[in-house]
Each structure stands twice: as C-alpha cells, then as structure tokens.
Amino acid sequence: MDLLNTLVDKGLRRELPTREEALAVLATSDDDLLDVVAAAGKVRRHWFGRRVKLNYLVNLKSGLCPEDCSYCSQRLGSSTGILKYTWLKPDEASKAAAAGLAGGAKRVCLVASGRGPTDRDVDRVAGTIKAIKDQNEGVEVCACLGLLSDGQAERLREAGADAYNHNLNTSESTYGDITTTHTYADRVDTVTKAHAAGLSACSGLIAGMGESDEDLVDVVYSLRELDPDSVPVNFLIPVEGTPLAKEWNLTPQRCLRILAMVRFVCPDVEVRIAGGREVHLRTMQPLALNLANSIFLGDYLTTEGQAGKADLEMIADAGFEVEGADQVTLPEHRAAAGSGCGSHESAGCGSHEGGGVCGTTAPATPANEARTDLVAVRRRGAGTDLAPNA
Ligand code: SF4
C-alpha cells in the first residue's frame, strides 16, 4: 500500500505525516490491519528495537477529587466504589514502588488525584521522591499531580523528579464536553511548565470517549507540537458510576489502528499503552507491542490490570524484551532530555476472559460489546494492606 510505504519513510525520517494520511490509517479495513501493524512496527523497531519499557503506577492519593473529568472514577460525585485515601506516607509509597521495580519496572509514576498540588503537597511529594530514590538506585520517577502553579515544576525537578505527566486527553474542540472544571489551555500550560523546568514531559490521550477520527488526529498533532518524550495512550474504561459508563466504543482492531496512527505521527517518542489495555485489546495485546514500546506493569490507579507475571510472559512470548535500567529508552537525539511517564486518570483492568469449550465453537465477540466483566476496581496494593500486583 502506497500509504504505508510513505508513512514508514516519513517515520524513519521523523517527518510529520499529513492529516489525511493519519486519518487514512484510522480508516483502514480489517483486511489491511496486519499490514498497518507491520508498517508501524518498522518505525517502532527503528527507534526502540524490541525493547519494552515497564512503568509502575503508585496512586499516592485516591478519589476525593473536586474536578469533574467525565472519564474518571475519582471525580466529583463518582459513585464507583473505588479505594479512597489521602496522601500515602513516603515509606508506604516507597514500599509500593519497590514491588513494581522488583517486578521489572524501571520507572515509577507517582500520581495524586486533585486539581493540582499545593506547595505543601509538592513538599510532601519531594519527600516521597527522596525516599524512593534513596532506596532504589537508578530509578526514574515521574510525578503526576494535576495542574501546576508557577515554581512547582522547578521544585519537583530539584527534588529529583525526572518527568511530569499531564495528559491532553482529547481534542481542544471536545475538551469542554469531557470536563468543565478546567480547560484544555490549562492542561497545555502545565505540560509547557514541566518542559520549561527541565522535566521530561509526558502527555497523552484517552480514546473511546465518543470522539471522531478528526478529534483523535487533532489531539495527536497537538501532542506532537508540545513535543513530549512519552505519549500514554489510554483506552477508556467505561467504569460504572461515571458519566461515560455506557461508552463502549472500542474494538481491538480500532485500538491497534489508533496506536499505529500515534506511532506514525510521533515516531521517535515513547508510546505507552496505558489504561484499557486488557479491557479493549484483550487477546490482541501482544500485537500492540509492535506499535507501542512501553506499558504499565500490574494494576492501574483505581482498577486492576492483569497479573504482572502475565505482562512479563506476554512480552517474552511476543519476542520482545523488558528494557533494563541500564538501557536508555529514548533515541540519542532525545535522550539528553530524559524520558516521560504516566497517566493521571483512572485506568485499566483485566481479568482473564473465558474461551470456548473444546469441541464447541466460541461465539465471536461482537464489535463494541460492553465488557464490564473485565473491569475490576483495585482492591490491593497502595492504600490497602494487601500485596501489590507486580
Ligand atoms: S482525572 Fe485527575 S483531575 Fe480529573 S477527576 Fe480524575 S483525579 Fe480529578
């Protein structure tokens, strides 16, 4: 396909595809899907080889948020029965982080619900970063604390944070439909502040909130303009008790096309599959490793992921390798600035889904079927007495 040859050439040269080309990737047929994955896979391997970076989420403060992001189970008025707790102490956070690092993660993403931190919160997180860095040599730490005020990014950088995550989530034109308590411009401002303070910027999106292909292309082009080092791609988990609970819009094929489009538009950037990997890609997860070079290990902020051991087995079975602490994630031209992180919103899940019984034909999964059976609220790890999943 001429389109794919053109996109591979551009990806290898870090040249921006046209919007029409990006839209055409999203419009490809199922018959062409493996060709799309193979083409984007060439770009992925050119910049990142067969390495998969593992990141580990620690939810420092869960729920009780005054903001109204429609996709988020921690939002104002959410009736989802998530874990709710205030700031973890530095040693509690460090213990949770250590579990993820022992499981193979090289980056810890420290996330807190809320509009943004107070200066006192930033000091508190600085203490947590110190505790984690003192006990785990070489660990990368990304903070994800919401909207930043002047000086806070610099303070986090001084405290040893390597990166800051704040997602754009969706296109500027639809942002107001998703959240009313802050604006798209607020989000851009925070990513810009993080960048300016010398933190590696991490900013991504959430697909599946009812947006159009044009919206998806818009947000990915906006991200390219902001030039983050990492782009987490979340697939909406329509959690019961949130306004988007009925938005089951994604199929595994659609998720693969979205990841391929992001790879073509941001070829040399750490593309991370974030929340919704298990729920929406399901058995197609290994194929997605040809597109993304980074995933979260274990659980998400408020929902459970598949077992950390299953993540590691999947990576090995698909012929990829976990990136070591001594390996540099980003291509040389980006590495000097560090690398990016996490996800602020409630993300992902997954329990193993049942297959067909031998001798019978398993019914095909209809497109867009609600898979609430794959969504489990997190009940272990940070904020509980139970061991974390890593
Ligand atoms: S995404 Fe962040 S700011 Fe928005 S409701 Fe959830 S925790 Fe609050």
Image: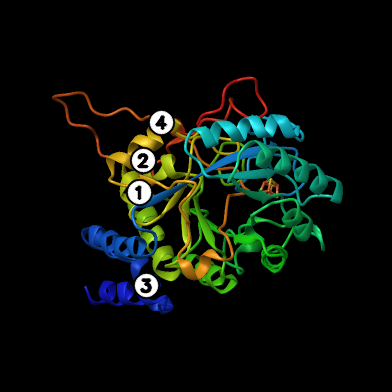
Q: In x, y percent, where is residue 327?
A: 45, 52
User: What residue does disc 2 label?
Assistant: 282
User: What residue does disc 3 label?
Assistant: 11
**Mark closer to the chain start, 3 or 2:** 3
Foreground label between 2 and 4: 4
Give the camera-side residue of 245 and 27.
27
Determine the CA span between mark 4 and mark 1: 22 Å
**Mark closer to the chain start, 3 or 4:** 3
Q: In x, y percent, where is residue 302?
A: 60, 36
Q: In x, y percent, where is residue 124?
A: 80, 42
Give the residue type that dot 3 points to.
Gly
Determine the CA span between mark 3 and mark 1: 23 Å
Q: What numbered label is drawn on residue 309?
A: 4
Crowd around label 2: few <14 · some 14–19 · many ≥20 (10 Å)? some
Crowd around label 3: few <14 · some 14–19 · many ≥20 (10 Å)? many
Going 63% across and 62% down the picture, which residue do you hit? Answer: 175
Determine the CA span between mark 1 and mark 2: 7 Å
Please state if 230 lies on the left or on the right of 251 as rendered: right
Going 35% across and 48% down the picture, which residue do you hit? Answer: 252
Q: What numbered label is drawn on residue 252?
A: 1
**Mark closer to the chain start, 3 or 1:** 3
Question: Is disc 1 in contact with disc 2, using a CB cutoff of under 8 Å?
Answer: yes
Give the residue type that dot 4 points to.
Lys
Whether the residue under disc 2 has CB within 8 Å of ligand 1: no
Determine the CA span between mark 3 and mark 4: 33 Å
Going 33% across and 60% down the picture, which residue do you hit? Answer: 45
